[in-house]
Amino acid sequence: MINHTLGENMKFNKKITNLLIIALSTLALSACSTGKKSGVGSGDVYTGTATVEYLASGVKDRVFFATNSSSLTTASRDTLRKQANYLRKNKDLNVVLEGHADERGTREYNLALGEKRANSAKDYLMTYGISGKRVSVISYGKEKPVNSASTPLAWSQNRRSVTIKAK
Amino acid sequence: MKKLIYTCVVLFFKFNVAYSLIEVDITRGNLDPLPIAVSPLHVDIQSENYKDVKVKELGELISSVIEKNFKSTGLFNPLDKNAFVQKPDIAHLKPRFEDWRLITAQALVTGKILIKDNKLKVEFRLWDLAASQEMVALAFTTTPSNWRRVAHIISDKIYERLTGETGYFDTRIIYVSETGPRTQRVKKLAIMDQDGANTKYLTLGNELVLTPRFNPANQLVTYMSYFRNLPRVYLLDIETGIQEVVGNFPGMTFAPRFSPDGKKIIMSFAKDGNSDIYTMNLESRLVERITEDSSIDTSPSFSPDGKYICFNSDRSGLQQIYTMKSDGTGTKRISFGNGIYGTPVWSPRGDLIAFTKMRAGKFYIGVMRSDGTGERLLTENYYQEAPSWSPNGRLLVFYRETKTNKDGEGFSAKLWSIDITGYNERELKTETDASDPSWSSLLSK
C-alpha cells in the first residue's frame, strides 16, 4: 500500500510546474507566431513518415499531436492544406477523419481527446473551403494503435488524426 | 434465464449473546486471517438424481466454492479438510467444539443438502468454536442447477455475520473480453460469476465494444458500441439479449453509467470537438444537458443518493476530478495532488471516490473522500485504470495492461481486485484477456 500525503513542498512544486508550463507554452506560442520553426512541432509530436500513407501523390493522410494536445503543428497545417487542395479538386470525394490517442491515458478521456483531435483537423480543412458536410469524424481513442510498442516513438505515432476516403 | 426461486427460512437467529462472539475486523487487511473450517455439506441419502448435477459430490463442491470465496477475501484462512475431526452429518447436528478447537479453527461451517422432487434443499450452520455456540442457521430451497449460487449465498451470510458488512459473493462481473493482436483487437462483452465461473459471451466481436456498466438496481447493462461504425451508448438486457441505442444523439456518446435508482443514464456526448455530460431518463426519454464547458467533460458517476455527480474534466488544463450537484450547479475541483486524475467513481457507501491517477509514467488506483481530502493510493503499475466498486464498497476491481517491448510484443490485459485498505491485491482469472470490469449488485437482495 502506498500512502500519499500532499505536503507543502508538493504544493510549492506544483506552482513551479504550473509556472514552467506557462513559460513553455508562451515559448511554443511565440515559436508558432513567428513561424521560425518548420517540420518539428512543439513537444513530442511525431515528425517521421514511417506510418504515413498517402491520399494522393504528395498528400499525406495523417497529422500527429503532442501528448494531451489537440493543437495542430506547422507541419500538420501544411499536410491539411494539401488535403484541402486535393479535396477541392475531387469534389465527389468525402472523407472520414479518425482521431486517435496513445495508450498512456484513461480510455474514456482518450475517446474525447481523439474526437477533439479529429475535429481540429476538420476545422482546419473547413477554413480552407471544404464543406463540413464532406467531412465526418470518428474517434477511436486508444483502441486502434498503429504501433503497439510501449515506447515514446510508438505513442507519438499513435497520437494522430487520419483522413480516410469515405466509402 | 433461470430465475432463482429461493425462500429463506430462518431457523434460529440468535441476536444478542452475553459472550463476546468472534468478529473479523475488516479495516485492517489480512494480517491475521481467521482460521475457519468449512465442513463438506452432508448429502442426504434420500437424494435423487437431477440432470447433470453430481449429487454425491455436491456437498464437497459447495464447500469448495465457499472456501474459495473466503480465501479470496484475505480475511479468512480456510483449514485443510484432511485435518477435520468429525463427519459432516454429525458435526452439523452438534459439533464437538473442543475437537475442532484442537485444529485451531475458530469458526465452523456445517450443512446438509437434499435433492428431492427436482428441488435442492439446503441447510447450513455457522458455529463459534470459542464460545461453543451456533451463530447462524439458515435453510432455503432452490433448483439444483443453482448450486453455485447456494454456495455464494451461504458465503455472503457467513461473511455478513462475521464482519458486520454486506457480502458480495452472489454477484457477477461484466467485462470486455479481448483477443487478437493489439492493432486488431477483437472485443466482446462477457459476464462471469464473481469467482470466475460461468463465463458467457454476450456479443460476437463484430464491432468494438467498451465500458459495460451494471445498473445498480437490476441486471441491465449500459455500454458503448461501434455498431455500424457509429459509436453510441447502448442499453442491454442480459436476461433477454435485447439491446437498444440510448437517445438520438448526432455524434459519439460514451462513458455511460446508471443513476443509483437505475432510471437514468449519465454519459458524455461529443460534438465538434467538445465533450459534455448529459443524462437521459429511460422512461420519459427526456435528455438533459448537465455541463456546458468548452473543455472535455467525461467519466461521470452519481453519488449513491443521486444528489451529486463526480466527473473528469480538463477545464483547468489537464485531467482533474470535479464534483457538482446533479443539476450541474456548484462545480468544485476536488483533486489537487501531483499528477493528473481520471475515471472517478463514487462508492456505493457514498463516502469515497475511487479514481485513476497518472504521475511520472505510472498509473495508480486510489481513493479519496468526496471532498477531495484523504487521498490514498492503493496500487501502482505501468498501466491500470477503470476501478469499479464491489456492491458493499469494500473492494475495487480494475484492469491492468502490461508494457510491451520495442516490437510491441508481450501485451496483456487482466482484471485485478484490491481491498480499499490496500491489502489483498489479486488477479481475477478470466478465460481471455479482459478490461473494463463492472461489478453487479447482489443477485438476491
Image (cartoon, rainbow, N blue to C red):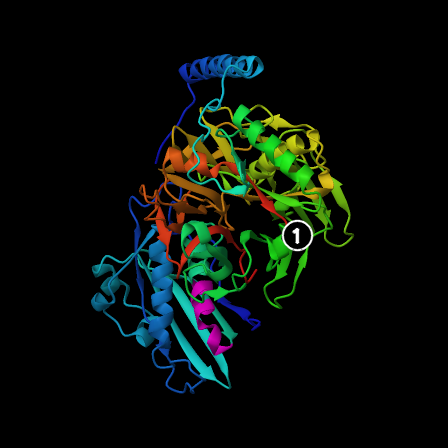
Q: In this view, does B284 lie to the left or right of B231?
A: right
Indicate whether residue B116 is drawn in magenta: no
Q: At x 37% / y 76%, what residue is drawn?
A: B58
Q: What stretch is highlighted in magenta?
A: B143-154
Nearest the eye: B100 or B281:
B281
Residue A53, placed above or below residue B205: above
Task: Write down the quadrant of residue B308 in the picture.
Answer: top right
For the C terminus of chain B, which image quadrant?
bottom right
Q: Is residue A131 visible?
A: yes
For the N terminus of chain B, which image quadrant?
bottom right
Q: Mark 1 highlights which residue?
A: B262
Chain at tag 1: B
Task: Write down the quadrant of residue A111 in the picture.
Answer: top right
Task: Return the x and y of residue B316 as percentages of the image width and height.
Answer: 58, 23
Q: Is residue B80 left or right of residue B115?
A: left
Indicate whether residue B151 is drawn in magenta: yes
Q: Residues within 10 Å of mark 1 (few under 14, many from 20)?
A: some
